[in-house]
Image (cartoon, rainbow, N blue to C red):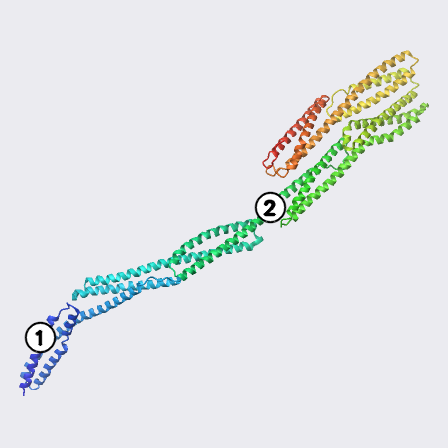
Amino acid sequence: MTQQPQDEFESSVESAVDWMKTIQERLRINDNTKGPRSALEARLRDTELEPEGRLKVDLVLMKADALLRCLSEEKKHEILSQLKDVKAMWEETAIYITHCHSRIEWVWLHWSEYLKAQDEFYVWIHNMKVTLEPDIELQLGLKEKQWQLNHAQVLLNDVINQSTLLERLLEEAASLYNRIGDPSVDEEVQKKMKLEYEEVKTEAERRVQLLEKITQEHEQYKTNVDQFQLWLTRVTERLNSCLSQGAKMPAENRIKSLQDIAKDVKNGEKKLRLLEAQSAGVMQNTSPLGAEKMKGELEELKQALEKLKLACLEEEERLMKTLRSENAYHSQARLLEAEVQEFRKSLQRLRNNFEPNDRVRSEEDLIALWRRYMGTTAALAEEESKVERLKTQLKELFRFSQDMQPLSDSVICAIREYQSLKGKTFKMSTETETELRQRFQNPLREFQLWKPSAQRLLDTTANISDPTLTDAFLLQIEEFLAESSRFKDQLLMLQLKKDFLNSIFDEERAKSLLTEAADATKEREHIHKGLLQRKSRLQALASQHLDFDTVFKALQKKLSSIKASLDAEKEPLPDLLSKQSRLQRLQAIQEETAECAIQLEELEKGAQSNPAQMHKIKLLSSDYQMLKRSLETRIAEGQLHVQEHWTFNDKLLDLQQWLSATRQKLESYRDVSGEWKTNNRASDMEKLQAEFPAKEIQLHFIEAHGQLVEENSSPEGVAHIQTELKKLKGSWKSLRDMMSSSVASPNNGMGFF
């Protein structure tokens, strides 16, 4: 009964031990990872022994269990010992199996994972090559290019991310190669894997770089286009602002703004040309539709720029036209205003010639005043052309669309001043001339009124024989003789000023007046002689009781007194007034001398019968005749001296007034800086030039006449005349130099006279 279990047990133990020994030997042979994958897989299958060994051990255990149930205790110990050895050997074998299997399995699994990863890597390489192989597709616009770049960058990032896997694969390959030594994972395979990766990476990087360049070019172009559009908008806004401001901004400022805008537009054209040049490169990397769109955008920008340029040019041209019109207006207006101011200054200078009407003036003052008024009248007549020129210039300015009211008012005011001054000058000159005519005609009128009264007095006193009436009549005769002397002076002065009479009277009336004065002089002399004779007769009648010697001595004393008075008038005098006063004194002496002649005749009548008395009378008569001739000579000289001095003063005053008026007129032709502005005064300058020759002749006449006056003037008067002549020549030279400077001015096309 125990033998069969014993045999089965021993047979199972032997079988198990033999199997474990065999397996241990196979494991020792298979415990190797080198070689191809198929060999590794075969060795891996050969190490899958644990289930079979466990079955053999379980069989031993089962046989041992069956044996142990039928063995004694002594026998059990031996069986258990065998079981223990079998279990120990199994445990050792199982460990060895597990270790060998695990080691091979780990390599196999690792290799499997590597192959899987490698397959995936090559699939990725293949897919990436397929993706990167086509040429870059041209895109419509920047957004599409940016998307395309983003996609390329994603691909590149994927490639870059795969470098980690590649590194792991290469590490795994190196590790596997060290373990298995298979050529499928040797260095050549690793280099090939790395090379293929680098090719993909290089292509991805190249594509990204190319797309970055394309995108950056398009972005830069787009930025430039946006900036150009923004610039175009701003310039358009500036132009619209300039156009909308209108009259708020002066035309000069608006033109300056438009010129600045035009400069910007010119710069914009350069920018647009740069954009067009830049767009050519961008269009090469853009789809045809996108390129057409870009061309359209550029054309729109070009048209907008051309429109802006055209609007700017048109507005500038319009403003320039307006400005030229305004400048022409302002230039003519300033010229007109300046001429109005000069005209009013001229009127003011002429207005200064007027004097207060309530002042009592001498005849000489009236003559000088009349000359000033006539000079003012002549000057005003010359100003008539200025008035017409002012009207013409004002009329020309009406064609401009400007506010003409202030300037028109100024011109009208100046013309009114001119008309007022012209009227006042005419009135004052007429009044002065009328007063002068009256002054010259009054002596004749008064003489004509006085003559009947004198004649009546002569008629009344013709037959007086009563000595008691002589005193009253002698007083009347003395008064009439004084009036007669006054008429003599006035008539003489009237004849001395015969040259001036032609200035205020027509030629016929002047001749008539001089004829009347000559006739009145003769009538006055006749009446005066009659009054003297009547005075002498009445005096003789009153002095009949006086003896001859008393009357003779009185007459002799009177003639001596007259001679002494005449001798006292020999010294030269300084001025016209003193010479006129001397002439009046000489005429008074002449009247006294004529009275002595009458008395001498009366005395001679009473001494006819007395030879001794007649001898005395003849001696006294001889003295009288010498005194008379001397007095007549002195009076003739006095008249000549007065005539010469009066003519000298009259011509001197006339030339001085002309020099002063001409200087003022020339000075009015200077601007504030002292420069001549005669370019619009050619006609006035020609008139002034034409006056110089005649005035130069007048200067020579005054100089020659001054020498005549000096010959009969005192040293004081000579010094005064020389001073006046020196001043006159200095004024003449200064005026001539001023005239030369004005006609030689660059602003004047005239040559010097």
Three-letter code for the amino acid on which mark 1 is drawn: Thr
Q: Residue at x 91, y 21 (%)?
A: 537
> Circle 2 sits on which residue?
328
- When asked about the image quadrant of residue 596, the answer is top right
Position above or below: 264 against 500 = below
Q: Residue at x 46, y 57 (%)?
A: 299
Nearest to viewer (mark 2 / mark 1) = 2
Mark positioned earlier in the residue sequence (2 or 1):
1
Residue 245, x across and y down, in percent: 56, 54
Quadrant showing the N terminus: bottom left
Residue 503, x across and y down, in percent: 76, 32
- When asked about the image quadrant of residue 737, the answer is top right
Three-letter code for the amino acid on which mark 2 is drawn: Ala
Instruction: Please tell me which residue lies in front, 417 or 272.
Output: 272
Residue 81 visible, this orientation: no
Q: CA distance from mark 2 to mark 1?
A: 132 Å
> Circle 1 sits on which residue?
22
Dot 2 falls on a residue whose secondary structure is helix
Image side of residue 211 versus residue 641, left or right: left
Q: Residue at x 23, y 65 (%)?
A: 169
Label 2: how many residues lie within 10 Å, few (<14), some (14-19) or many (20+)? some
Label 1: how many residues lie within 10 Å, few (<14), some (14-19) or many (20+)? few
Instruction: Please tell me which residue lies in front, 388 or 50.
Output: 388
Image side of residue 451 versus residue 410, left or right: right
Instruction: Please tell me which residue lies in front, 43 or 410.
Output: 43
Residue 485, x across and y down, in percent: 83, 26
Position above or below: 629 against 240 = above
